[in-house]
Image (tube, grey):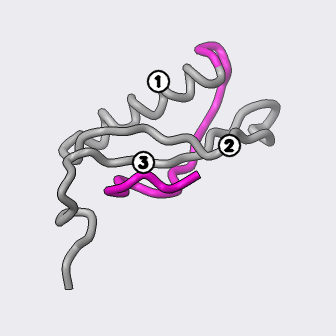
């Protein structure tokens, strides 16, 4: 059995997540993705996710997030 993530031809990966914000984080964004190299560290991935949340919600908005798909080799069709 092959690992479709490791064996994918492209080095780019798409990590999908949902950001939660608002009072007690009861509001959520749509599914958001960040594109990154497969070799990015976990720390760097979390920085990329936080930067993307800041782009969508603004730097001052408290938010947390839940990763839905980690390092998928292809973009998920919208």
Q: Which residue is mark 2?
A: 30
Q: Which residue is mark 3?
A: 15
- 38 to the left or right of 31: left
Q: Which residue is mark 1?
A: 51
Sooner in the amino-acid sequence: mark 1 or mark 3:
3
53 and 7: which is toward the camera:
7
Residue 47 location in percent, x, y? Answer: 39, 29
Query: Label 1 crowding class (10 Å Cα cut-off): few <14, some 14-19, many 20+?
Result: some
- 11 to the left or right of 61: left
Sooner in the amino-acid sequence: mark 3 or mark 2:
3
Q: How many marks?
A: 3
Residue 24 location in percent, x, y? Answer: 78, 37
Query: Label 3 crowding class (10 Å Cα cut-off): few <14, some 14-19, many 20+?
Result: many
Q: Tell me where residue 65 sits by quadrant.
A: top right
The residues colored magenta run 58-78
Residue depth check, mark 2 versus mark 1: number of the one nearer the observer: 2
Which residue, as the protein is rendered here, is positioned at the far front? 77
Which corner quadrant holds the N terminus? bottom left
76 magenta-colored? yes
Query: Which label sits on residue 12?
Result: none
Residue 12 location in percent, x, y? Answer: 26, 45
């Amino acid at each position: 059995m092959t690992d479709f993530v490791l064996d994918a031809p492209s080095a780019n990966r798409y990590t999908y997540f949902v950001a939660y914000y608002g009072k007690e984080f009861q509001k959520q964004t749509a599914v958001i993705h960040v594109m990154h190299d497969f070799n990015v560290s976990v720390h760097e991935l979390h920085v990329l996710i936080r930067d993307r949340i800041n782009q969508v919600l603004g730097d001052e908005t408290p938010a947390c997030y839940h990763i839905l798909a980690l390092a998928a080799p292809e973009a998920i069709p919208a």
